[in-house]
Amino acid sequence: MVSVSIGLFLEGLLGVEAGQDAVLRTMLYEKGEEKVDPYDITVFEFTNMISRLRNELGKCGVKDKGLIVPLKHGAESRTTNNVLSADPDSLSYSRTPKEIMRIMYGTGDEHRPGGFFPKGANGGIAREYLNNDKPRGL
């Protein structure tokens, strides 16, 4: 029963994240060629950098890509835009709780808070990672 509850929780969390992500990515795509001050890079370039960081922090391979991708990585290899983040078969990428916490904390370590949650997240899954396995090193 617990694993079913956690599974439903994660599916719900990922569903909400995907919906928010699609709205934000649509807005960013519309401004894709504009330069981001003061960095002098385009929104498209910026999103690629963010995607690379999320992949690095998540330690899960490539599960995030910018708004423009090579044709072979686009939806069904038919487009270079990547507003709805998905793999070449148009399927959503899955993330484990550990991967999500590594990215949200911005530390690359599900046991060490930071980023959006400098004191650590307060949900059951997050507390479990914060209190077990590894010293937090705070």
Image: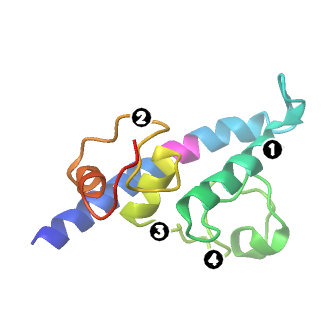
Residue extent of the magenta highlight: 19-23
Task: Check disc 1: other Cα within 10 Å, few if <14, some if 14-19, many if 20+.
Answer: many
Give the mark toward the camera: 2 or 4.
Answer: 2
Identity, as a three-letter code, of the amino acid under mark 4: Asp
- Tell me what residue is drawn at x 46 percent, y 62 percent: 99
Q: Answer left or right for 50 relative to 24.
A: right
Q: Secondary structure at mark 1?
A: helix
- Residue holding disc 1: 44
Give the mark toward the camera: 4 or 3.
Answer: 3
Q: Quadrant of the N terminus?
A: bottom left
Asked whether residue 38 appears in the rendered view, the answer is yes
Q: Secondary structure at mark 2?
A: loop
Identity, as a three-letter code, of the amino acid under mark 3: Ser
**Quick check: marks 2 and 4 in contact, CB under 8 Å?**
no
Q: Position of residue 83 (x, y in %)?
A: 67, 52
Identity, as a three-letter code, of the amino acid under mark 1: Phe
Q: Position of residue 76 (x, y in %)?
A: 71, 75
- Tell me what residue is drawn at x 67 percent, y 35 percent: 27
Task: Check disc 2: other Cα within 10 Å, few if <14, some if 14-19, many if 20+.
Answer: few
The colour scheme is rainbow
Q: Which mark is residue 118?
A: 2
Q: Which mark is residue 94?
A: 3
Name the foreground residue: 13 vs 107.
Answer: 107
Which is nearer the N-term, disc 2 or disc 3? 3
On screen, 76 above or below 50? below
Identity, as a three-letter code, of the amino acid under mark 2: Pro
Q: Position of residue 19 (x, y in %)?
A: 47, 47
Q: Which mark is residue 89?
A: 4
On screen, 134 above or below 61? above
Q: How far apart, in angstroms, are the residues tagged by discs 1 and 3?
A: 23 Å
